[in-house]
Amino acid sequence: MTVTHHVRVHRSDENLAREDQLAWKIAEVAADPVEVEQDVVDMIINRIIDNASVAAASLTRAPINAARAQAFRHPVSTGGVGANLFGAELDHRTSPEWAAWANGVAVRELDYHDTFLAAEYSHPGDNIPPILAVAQHTGKDGRALVRGIATGYEIQMDLVRAICLHKHKIDHVAHLGPSAAAGIGTLLGLDVETIYQAVGQGLHTTTATRQSRKGEISTWKAHAPAFAGKMAVEAVDRAMRGQTSPAPIYEGEDGVIAWMLDGKDAAYEVPLPAAGEPKRAILDSYTKEHSAEYQAQALIDLARKLGIENPALRDPANIESIVIHTSHHTHNVIGSGANDPQKYDPTASRETLDHSVPYIFAVALQDGGWHHVDSYAPERAGRADTVALWHKITTAEDAEWTRRYHPRTRMRRRSAVASRSG
């Protein structure tokens, strides 16, 4: 069964015991020796392949070249054999934190790997590069790797189910730092105390604002989760050397919840597996068909269907306006409700266009498909008839779509809990 933990802010004079802190509860889950069930093992293998595939498709792109160049400036650290970078010679290795960095950028660059959406947003496949890098460096076997990845997915997705970050303009990788640290702790078979310290450091060093996904979106969008993974590797290393972390990192009166999230009167109900319960969260994650923000997937399908069935819709001269009624998230993050003029700018970055429903809908409508490179090319974005059509497209929040979206995420969780409790 799943245990729901009530998490609130505590005054310093309340002396919240570490055993009652969320970071400790996360560490207990990570240290639990429970085996990974076969259907979860199969899905982890799928996700490793998916990550490697989307990374391979991005290897010639500038952010990856920069990250790889940085990584290879650093020699293999002592205490292990180093870790590989996607696309590099197998005997050309670097230290695990820098492999986590370079591979994390490669996995994230095309916005093409797996996703999980609930109270917060996430790409839980971002856990794989840091955990895999440490496994390679330390010579861990496949069983240990699978156990580490299962923990990374479980912790990030359980935090995503319960704690909203974007409402307070905190980037979603704040859930990734703790989850990757916990996953590495499982991989290495560390004790609860050490993982607890690493989780606290992982969170403390990875809280950043969502400006990286607002306005003119930069190449940092791909680097942000890689940075969180790198920090997780370093956090575990520090914790293994006996170094401690700010605590209570979530519940403290000057902690993350009190000053970055819902404030000193806030409370969250965070679900985590009970002792001995298999970690199955990865089965609730899902991959993408198209290289675009997840909420745009169905809109790409709709747009290409409309264009194929009625080609006249591709000509802006035949369109007065297109209003897409959708959920709160789609309207306010990647739709016209974001109030970002850059989402209508034909010279905008690929990262910005990836978060523009009006642009994505216009191109998919005209082209009858979507391509991870060609659909974002400057010449494609700047085509006169596309710009004309694009500027006629807006979004509107529809209360019914928002209502349907949130119960759907809760229903997935209830279904998962029921199957686990038998």
Image (spheres, rainbow, N blue to C red):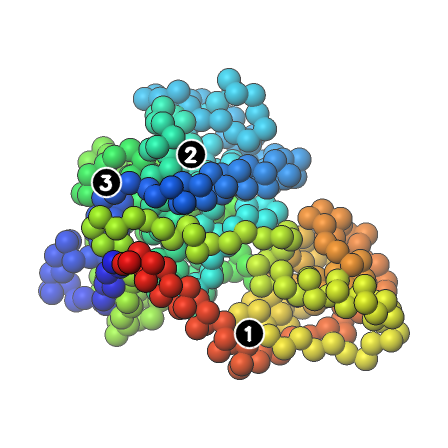
**Circle 3 residue:** 33
Kindly identify the amino acid type of the residue bearing the numbered disc 2.
Answer: Leu
Kindly identify the amino acid type of the residue bearing the numbered disc 1.
Answer: Ser
Nearer mark to the viewer, of 1 and 3: 3
Element type where label 3 sits in the image: loop
**Circle 2 residue:** 132
Q: Is residue 343 in sight in this rendering?
A: no
Kindly indicate the quadrant of the structure image that contains residue 148: top left
Which of the image's four quarters has the C terminus?
A: bottom left
Kindly identify the amino acid type of the residue bearing the numbered disc 3.
Answer: Pro
Residue 155: percent from left, percent from top: 34, 52
Q: Earlier in the sequence, mark 1 or mark 3?
A: 3
Tell me: 114 left or right of 176.
right
Q: What's the residue at 17%, 67% (across, down)? A: 11
Disc 2 from disc 3: Cα separation: 19 Å
In the picture as drawn, the residue positioned furthest to the front comes out as 422
- Crowdedness near tag 1: few (<14), some (14–19) or many (≥20) residues, C-alpha within 10 Å: many
Tell me: 213 left or right of 4.
right
Q: How many marks?
A: 3
Q: What's the residue at 63%, 39% (across, down)? A: 58
- Crowdedness near tag 3: few (<14), some (14–19) or many (≥20) residues, C-alpha within 10 Å: some
Along the line of sight, which residue is nearer the eye, 45 or 379?
A: 45
Q: What's the residue at 23%, 54% (across, down)? A: 274
Q: What's the residue at 69%, 62% (across, down)? A: 301
183 is higher (above) or lower (below) than 390 = above
The dot on residue 327 is 1
Residue 375: percent from left, percent from top: 74, 53
Disc 1 from disc 3: Cα separation: 40 Å
211 is higher (above) or lower (below) than 391 = above
